[in-house]
Amino acid sequence: MSGSTMFGNYTDSARRAVVMAREESRFIHDSYIGPEHLLLGLLHTYPNTVQTALGVSPEEVRDALVGFVPSGPPDTSASFPFTRESLDALKTAQRTARELHSDHVGIKHLLFGVLSVHGHRLDRALVDAGADRDSAQTRVMAALTQG
């Protein structure tokens, strides 16, 4: 899927979160976009939505996700590929929107997608922050189905 095709039916808000995921990846010196970066992008753009879903403060989640950031300039390479897990999160967001008869993938679809995949850093950060993934997924789905 090309970038424009992949994100064509994303709301501006959801697209902004994905763009921020890339910036967050660059900031913490990674050269890829994983589900943890997608969550950081969501935290950056929509902290209240994430806090409501996870039941913990955005700062706690951010601190747990970022952990130790090496010093030095951020990565400036042009290419930041999505990992398999982050692509799975994006596909789950698309599928969830479709199943809920939505024409667009929004922030909550994207958050649901991120919470649906596992990645070492993401999983560890959710535990470290005190977030319960299953409860969070349930809350996001309830918010999605209530409109």
Image: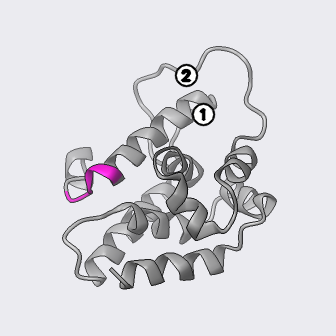
For residue 135, side relative to residue 141 (left or right): right
Q: Is residue 115 above or below residue 5?
A: below
* Residue 119: x %, y % from top left: 64, 59
What residue lies at 37% left-to-right and 84% top-to-bottom? 146
Few, some or many residues within 10 Å of mark 2 (<14, 14–19, 20+)? some
Please say whether residue 98 is one of the residues in the magenta stretch: no
Residue placed at 71% from the left, 61% from the top?
126
Residue annotated with mark 1:
30
Residue name at image x 46 percent, y 67 percent:
113
Was residue 12 drawn as part of the magenta stretch in this picture? yes
Is residue 61 rendered to the left or right of residue 106?
A: right
Query: Mark 2 falls on what kind of element?
Result: loop
Q: Amino acid at mark 2?
A: Asp
Give the extent of the magenta segment. 9-13
Q: Which residue is mark 2?
A: 75
* Amino acid on which the number 1 mark rests in the picture: Asp
Of the pair 143 and 99, the residue shown nearer to us: 143
Q: Percent from the top left, x then y, of residue 67?
A: 77, 40
